[in-house]
Image (tube, grey):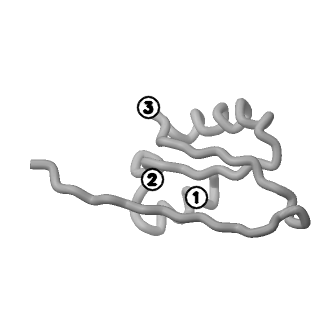
């Protein structure tokens, strides 16, 4: 979280500007602890989130991640 905050601060932003997170955990059983930590950093509503369990490096066949953003104007 500190690394994320450092990057946000470089752009004159803070955790209030985060709308989505992607989190990679070694064990999904750690999700409750992660959410407790998130609540310390994100005040008010939490950002949208995708949480994934990582496969150990030796077991991976391929890595891929894609993202699409659609921007529209509010009238």
Secondary structure of residue under mark 3: loop
Farthest residue, direction left? 75
Q: Nearer the viewer, residue 45 or 29?
A: 29
Q: Nearer the viewer, residue 67 or 38?
A: 67
Q: Which mark is residue 44?
A: 3
Q: Are marks 3 and 1 in contact (CB under 8 Å)?
A: no
- Ranked by sequence position, the earlier of labels 3 and 1 is 1
When the figure is inspected, residue 53 is found, relative to residue 8, above or below; the finding is above
Q: Position of residue 29 (x, y in %)?
A: 80, 34
Alpha carbon distance from label 3 to label 1 = 18 Å
Q: Which residue is mark 1?
A: 4
Q: Position of residue 10 (x, y in %)?
A: 47, 68
When the figure is inspected, residue 65 is found, relative to residue 40, above or below; the finding is below
When the figure is inspected, residue 47 is found, relative to residue 54, above or below; the finding is above
Secondary structure of residue under mark 2: loop
Q: Is residue 70 left or right of residue 20?
A: left
Q: Which residue is mark 2?
A: 14
Q: Position of residue 58 (x, y in %)?
A: 90, 66
For the point 69% across and 48% down, the residue is 52
């Amino acid at each position: 979280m500190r690394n994320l905050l450092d990057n946000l601060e470089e752009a004159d932003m803070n955790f209030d500007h985060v709308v989505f997170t992607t989190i990679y955990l070694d064990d999904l059983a750690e999700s409750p602890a992660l959410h407790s930590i998130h609540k310390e950093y994100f005040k008010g509503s939490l950002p949208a989130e995708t949480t994934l369990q990582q496969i150990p490096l030796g077991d991976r066949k391929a890595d891929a991640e894609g993202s699409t953003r659609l921007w529209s104007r509010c009238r």
